[in-house]
Amino acid sequence: MCIKKNPILYIVIPCYNEEEVLPVTSPMFLKKIEDLVSLGKIDKESRILFVNDGSKDKTWEIISELAKKDEHFIGISQSRNRGHQNAVLAGMMEAKEKCDITITIDCDGQDDINAMDEMVDAYLDGCEVVYGVRKKRTTDTFFKRFTAEGFYKFMNFMGAENVFNLADYRLVSKRVLEAFSEYKEVNLFLRGMFPLVGFKSTSVYYDRAERMAGESHYPLKKMLGLAFDGITSLSIKPIRMITGLGLFFAILSFVGIIWAFIETFTGHAVMGWASTVCLICFMGGVQLLSFGVIGEYIGKIYMETKKRPRYIISERTYEKEKEESAGEKERI
Ligand code: UDP
Ligand code: MG
């Protein structure tokens, strides 16, 4: 049995330019840890691990201050902004050695912190992955809701199956994290990747609130980027669709040829210039689109073959333990 009673919990929180929100939400995270400890659900060695994702404002200074004031707060800093997914990965990999379970959550207070109780209960009941799922998005602006819902529908259509409204709010056990660390891809889409790892899982439902301060860092452009990464990392359906499209036009042109023969033999005039031009334009468009999609996959292969590090930690609020001996062990 890999479920540990009284597990050490690390709450992993990515932060990018969050100087406005951190002073508001950090006491809430601390209180949650203290409450869970006093309820006897988690160990007192549990920590809140902030991952500064190359913020340009005072985020890292705030994290460092918090770490000085209370031992429950610790932080790591990425050498530059790498995006939300890489920040979460960096935090989880950092925490993996020290804890029994991690819960990843955004730092803006949008995801209901109280759902953590249920998540830990689900873990104690034997689930090693617990997904946080948003009930509804009434607090998001219409535009955000519309684009986010469109995002999930599009993803499902393209073969990247996703639990609707699944967030990056998730409990993962150490054993799952160890299995996950074998997934070496650079092109990350965490919420689609954890279901691939397997293990017993369940979902916890919660209401999504408004951001407590500051602004969203997920504008349409980043969301489209994430959708594209999600689709291309989980599915080859777009390439299949191109094959289907090719087949469709092959059949169509075959019919066209027969039709042209009939037209010629029945003595009708040569078809007009317009239809030829239309056909050329249309085929040109289809071909360019197809090249684009194939190119996207080739681009991904290119990025993956480089095997560049997915995150680089430049600073910590604490000393990294036993680096030498761990390195030694690996060499042996
Ligand atoms: N974030 C990050 N790196 C980025 C963008 C965002 O670490 O490049 C963090 C951000 O600080 C927050 C979380 O990811 O904790 C989610 O971002 P945000 O709240 O802006 O997105 P939304 O909830 O609007 O989708
Ligand atoms: Mg948010």
Image (tube, rainbow, N blue to C red):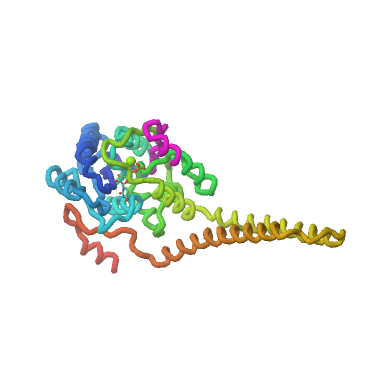
- Tally the numbered discs: 0
- Residue 233 position in % (x across, y down): 46, 55
* Direction from residue 305 to residue 154 in the image, left or right: right
Please say if 288 is above or below 165.
below
Of all residues shown, which one is farthest toward the right? 266
* Direction from residue 171 to residue 263 in the image, left or right: right
Q: Residue at x 50, y 48 (%)?
A: 160
Query: Can residue 294 be seen?
Result: yes
Q: Residue at x 27, y 52 (%)?
A: 53
Of all residues shown, which one is farthest toward the left? 69
Q: Nearer the viewer, residue 248 or 221?
A: 221
Query: Can residue 127 be seen?
Result: no
Q: Specify the segment rendered in magenta.
A: 127-147
- Residue 139 position in % (x across, y down): 37, 32
Where's the C terminus, which quadrant? bottom left
Q: Nearer the viewer, residue 206 or 289?
A: 289
Question: Residue 130's quadrant in the figure?
Answer: top left
Asked whether residue 129 is drawn in magenta, I would say yes
Q: Residue at x 22, y 41 (%)?
A: 20
- For ligand 2, give the image quadrant: top left
